[in-house]
Amino acid sequence: MAIVSISLKDNLLREVDKLSADVGYSARSEVVRAGLRMLLEEHDARSKLAGQVDALLLLVHDEKSFEHISRIRGKYQSIVKTQLHSHLGNDKCLEVLLLYGDAVDIKGMAADYQSNKKIHNTKLVIL
C-alpha cells in the first residue's frame, strides 16, 4: 500500500478524529480511505448521467461569498427552476437549487461549485 501525505487545517483534523471515534475507525487513514471511496463512487455515478435530468443542488457557503454563488448560477440560469436561500448560524448560508436540464450542464454546475473554495459543502442529488 502506498503512503500519501496530506495537509489538513486543524479544524478539519479535529472533525476527522471525532468521526473516527464516533464510527469506530482505528486510524485516520481509514476515515480518509472511506471518504475517498464515497467520493469516487459518487463521481462514477455522476459520470454516467445522460439526457434530461431533475436534480437538487445543495450548497453551504459564507454569507460574504454570495457574489461567487450568483456568478456561477448566472452561467447556468437556464437549468435553475427554483432557488431557496436561507441564513444559517455562524454567518453561513444554505442554497437549495432545483434543477432541470441536460446532464452535462447539471454536472458542470455542480463541478463549478465543488471546485470553488468559497463553498464549504456541495451536494448533488439526482431526483
Image (cartoon, rainbow, N blue to C red):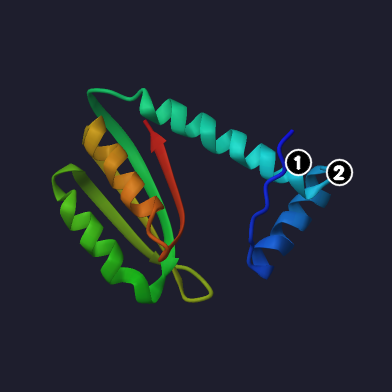
Q: Nearer the viewer, residue 11 or 77?
A: 11
Q: Position of residue 82 (x, y in %)?
A: 24, 49
Vertical relation: 33 (above or below) 12: above
Q: Secondary structure at mark 2?
A: loop
**What is the three-letter code of the residue carrying label 2?**
Ser
Q: Position of residue 106 (x, y in %)?
A: 27, 39
Q: Quadrant of residue 18?
A: bottom right
The image's mark for residue 121 is none
Q: Position of residue 38 (x, y in %)?
A: 58, 35
Q: Position of residue 99 (x, y in %)?
A: 26, 41
Quadrant in which the N terminus appears = top right
Q: Residue at x 49, y 33 (%)?
A: 42
Vertical relation: 8 (above or below) 43: below
Circle 1 is placed at which residue position?
30
Q: Residue at x 45, y 27 (%)?
A: 44
**What is the three-letter code of the residue carrying label 1?**
Glu
Quadrant in which the C terminus appears = top left
Residue 111 falls left or right of residue 1:
left
Circle 2 is placed at which residue position?
26
